[in-house]
Amino acid sequence: MTDTPPDHLSNDPRSPHYNEAAMNRGIGIRFNGNERRDVEEYCVSEGWIRVAAGRALDRRGQPLTVKLRGTVEPYFHLEA
């Protein structure tokens, strides 16, 4: 695996952008300079993240998400 996180990543196993190896390694996200721990999905090239919209769920029991636009900087957590 490379030291660069994927351009587009989702934490939902049903998504085509899910990458189990990257998720197991640990991904951190800086969005507009602030650390975010509630990111469901991100895309660096398009400049957006998806975060849960409160505690609301859709009809399949998945959290409703909101797309936020800005500067996305993913990184791998340091291995201890």
Image: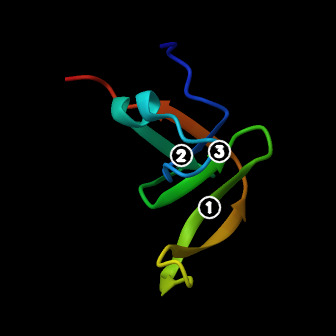
53 sits left or right of 45 in the view:
left
Is 46 rendered above or below residue 4?
below
Q: Which amino acid does label 1 sit on?
A: Arg
The quadrant in which the C terminus is found is top left
Residue 14, horizontal then vertical, whole percent: 55, 52
- Report the residue that reaches farthest toward the left: 80
Q: What residue type is labelled 2?
A: Arg
- Specify which label sits upstream in the sequence, 2 or 3: 2
Label 3: which residue?
A: 72
Q: Residues within 10 Å of mark 3 (few under 14, many from 20)?
A: many
Residues at marks 2 and 3, CA–CA distance in whole angstroms: 6 Å
Residues at marks 3 and 1, CA–CA distance in whole angstroms: 11 Å
- Specify which label sits upstream in the sequence, 3 or 1: 1
Label 1: which residue?
A: 50
Label 2: which residue?
A: 30
Residue 17, horizontal then vertical, whole percent: 62, 41
